[in-house]
Image: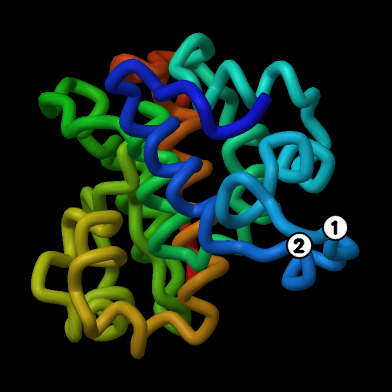
């Protein structure tokens, strides 16, 4: 059965169902099978495109499954032909984009790491924490990131600052990688995973 039951107030299910209704079988390479009771693709068709079981996808739309993995959300996003902004929204609804967490001792940059960073005079280099916030940067990195209004909170700037789309040549790829990095660094409640170390990112 399809389209008869709701998602019991589950925003991700509502979103997926709305986006599913916008696609036609022809748009995803399926043959038309005449008149349909509901607009758009059937749940079973989305499941086939995403490589998940029809039962799992139905439970996800209905709100009976509320903890999809990042891989599953990404596969469904591809199946539904979501653009980058819609993919990000789907991830957020699935609880895969963490809420801001308080700064902690891990935000203190080791002097040895600072010395190493400044040892790259001809390359932009900066230190980020597990939330992808810039903790320190060398002069070339400062110049590179200058167009951004908030150079410390890189993810916020990446998605909200129009200058980021000009700064990063392949913005969609950077956005997807950043979202996945945040997902891997946090659990679904937004709690930071302590085993994820700070790292230097030369550009």
**Image-based side of 19 in relation to 31, left or right:** left
Q: Residues within 10 Å of mark 1 (few under 14, many from 20)?
A: few
Asked if labels 1 and 2 touch by Cβ distance under 8 angstroms, the answer is yes
Residue at (11%, 66%) from the top-left corner? 150
Residue at (30%, 66%) from the top-left corner? 158
Q: Quadrant of residue 8?
A: top left
Determine whether the residue tagged by mark 2 lies in a helix, strand or loop: helix
Q: Which residue is mark 2?
A: 25
Pick whichever, 109 or 44, lies toward us. Answer: 44
Distance between the alpha carbons at the discs numbered 2 and 1: 9 Å
Residue 178 x/y as whole percent: 45, 52
Q: Which residue is mark 1?
A: 33
The relative height of residue 170 versus residue 153 in the rendered view (above or below) is below
**Image-based side of 123 in relation to 79, left or right:** left
Q: Quadrant of residue 25?
A: bottom right
Tell me if residue 199 can be seen. no
**Image-based side of 37 in relation to 67, left or right:** right
Identify the residue at the far right of this view: 31
Q: Residues within 10 Å of mark 2 (few under 14, many from 20)?
A: some
Residue 160 x/y as whole percent: 20, 67
Determine whether the residue tagged by mark 1 lies in a helix, strand or loop: loop
Q: Quadrant of the N terminus?
A: top right
Compare marks 2 and 1 and give the one earlier in the sequence: 2
Pick whichever, 100 or 35, lies toward us. Answer: 35
Tell me if residue 63 can be seen. yes
Identify the residue at the far top of this view: 64
Pick whichever, 58 or 191, lies toward us. Answer: 58
């Amino acid at each position: 059965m399809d389209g008869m039951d709701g998602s019991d107030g589950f925003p991700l299910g509502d979103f997926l169902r709305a986006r599913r209704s916008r696609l036609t079988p022809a748009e995803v390479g399926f043959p038309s099978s005449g008149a349909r009771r509901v607009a758009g693709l059937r749940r079973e068709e989305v499941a086939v495109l995403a490589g998940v079981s029809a039962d799992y996808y139905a439970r996800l739309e209905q709100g009976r499954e509320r903890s999809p993995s990042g891989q599953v959300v990404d596969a469904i996003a591809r199946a539904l032909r979501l653009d980058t902004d819609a993919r990000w929204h789907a991830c957020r609804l699935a609880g895969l984009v963490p809420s801001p967490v308080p700064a902690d001792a891990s935000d203190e940059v080791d002097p040895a790491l600072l010395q190493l960073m400044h040892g790259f005079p001809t390359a932009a280099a900066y230190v980020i924490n597990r939330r992808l916030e810039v903790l320190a940067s060398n002069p070339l990195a400062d110049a590179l990131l200058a167009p951004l209004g908030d150079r410390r909170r890189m993810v916020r700037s990446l998605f909200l600052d129009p200058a980021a789309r000009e700064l990063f040549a392949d913005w969609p790829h950077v956005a997807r990688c950043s979202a996945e990095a945040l997902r891997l660094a946090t659990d679904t409640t937004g709690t930071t995973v302590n085993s994820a170390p700070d790292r230097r990112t030369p550009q």
